[in-house]
């Protein structure tokens, strides 16, 4: 799907998780000014659904994708679809969510961890995957998996920071998802939006530089 290619080419998913409604737009706008163009709203609280709607409305006519994350069952998939979420992310393999996304042609990035999960996704023509939690395996894990499996791309989510970003890119991930390490609580509490903007900018610059070197 073209949309998944756009996410792959961009290389950064900004994860909106436990952000208050009051701070939502300022946080997203700060990340946008830093170069973020792909956002995931994690469905870990009831207000998350309205946050998808708010971000979709706020970024209307801008080149921004807003997806639903932590889509762990069909109900969440349906509700997110009704709000026109651009894509789904899951923390693991949920067949009913995969089936729903296929039926309605909604791009999905499934969470994987084990070789069996990688194989299942590849067999079902799901080629952009999310390694989660990425910081729970050694950095050579993806390169080792490319022995038996080579027809996939994977993003690292879980434990990725500005400081270790280069390691994850060098390890074979085509991009990353970052939440609290990017949108730091202290910056939000103290309304230091410029810190978020500059941090996102540095991360995007690292990803762009790495992709140029490949």
Image (cartoon, grey):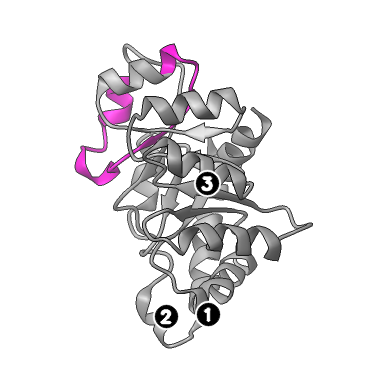
Quick one: 137 or 88, which is closer to the camera?
88
| Element carrying mark 2 | helix
CA–CA distance in space, label 1 to label 3: 31 Å
Query: Compared with residue 174, is residue 120 higher up or lower down, i.e. above or below?
Result: above
Residue 159, image x and y in percent? 29, 53
The residues tagged by marks 3 and 2 sit, at their Cα atoms, a distance apart of 31 Å
Q: What's the CA distance linking mark 1 and mark 2? A: 7 Å
Q: Nearer the viewer, residue 140 or 81?
A: 81
> In the rendered structure, are the residues bearing label 1 and label 3 in contact, judged by CB atoms less than 8 Å apart?
no
Q: Which residue is mark 2?
A: 187
User: In percent of the image, x 36 and y 30: which residue is there?
Assistant: 94
- Label 3: which secondary element: helix
Q: Residue at x 50, y 16 (%)?
A: 125
Q: Quadrant of residue 139?
A: top left
Q: Magenta segment range?
A: 122-145
Residue 67 located within the stretch drawn in magenta: no
Where is residue 71? Give x, y as percent.
42, 42
Residue 193 is labelled as 1
Mark 2, other Cα within 10 Å: few <14 / some 14–19 / many ≥20: some
What residue sits 59% from the left and 33% below the top? 106
The secondary element bearing badge 1 is classed as helix
Image mark for residue 79? 3
The reply to whether callout 1 and callout 2 are in contact (CB within 8 Å) is yes
Q: Is residue 201 above or below residue 101?
A: below
Q: Is residue 99 left or right of residue 8?
A: left
The picture places residue 213, in percent across and down from the top left corner, at 54, 39
- Residue farthest to the bottom, as pictured: 190
Residue 4: give x, y in percent of width and height: 59, 34
């Amino acid at each position: 799907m073209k949309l998944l290619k756009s996410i792959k080419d961009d290389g950064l998913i900004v994860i909106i998780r436990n952000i208050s409604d009051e701070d939502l737009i300022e946080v997203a706008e700060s990340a946008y000014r830093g170069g973020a163009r792909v956002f995931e709203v994690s469905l870990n609280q009831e207000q998350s659904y309205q946050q998808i709607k708010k971000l979709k409305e706020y970024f209307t006519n801008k080149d921004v994708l807003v997806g639903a994350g932590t889509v762990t069952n069909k109900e969440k998939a349906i509700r997110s679809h009704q709000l026109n979420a651009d894509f789904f992310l899951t923390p693991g393999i949920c067949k009913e969510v995969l089936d729903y996304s296929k039926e309605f042609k909604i791009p999905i990035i499934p969470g994987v961890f084990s070789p069996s999960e990688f194989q299942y996704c590849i067999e079902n023509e799901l080629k952009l995957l999310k390694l989660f939690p990425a910081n729970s395996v050694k950095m050579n894990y993806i390169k080792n998996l490319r022995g038996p499996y080579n027809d996939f791309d994977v993003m690292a989510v879980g434990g990725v920071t500005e400081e270790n970003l280069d390691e994850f890119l060098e390890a074979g991930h085509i991009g990353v998802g970052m939440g609290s390490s990017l949108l730091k609580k202290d910056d939000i509490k103290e309304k230091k939006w410029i810190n978020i903007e500059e941090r996102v900018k540095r991360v995007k610059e690292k990803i762009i530089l790495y992709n140029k070197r490949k």
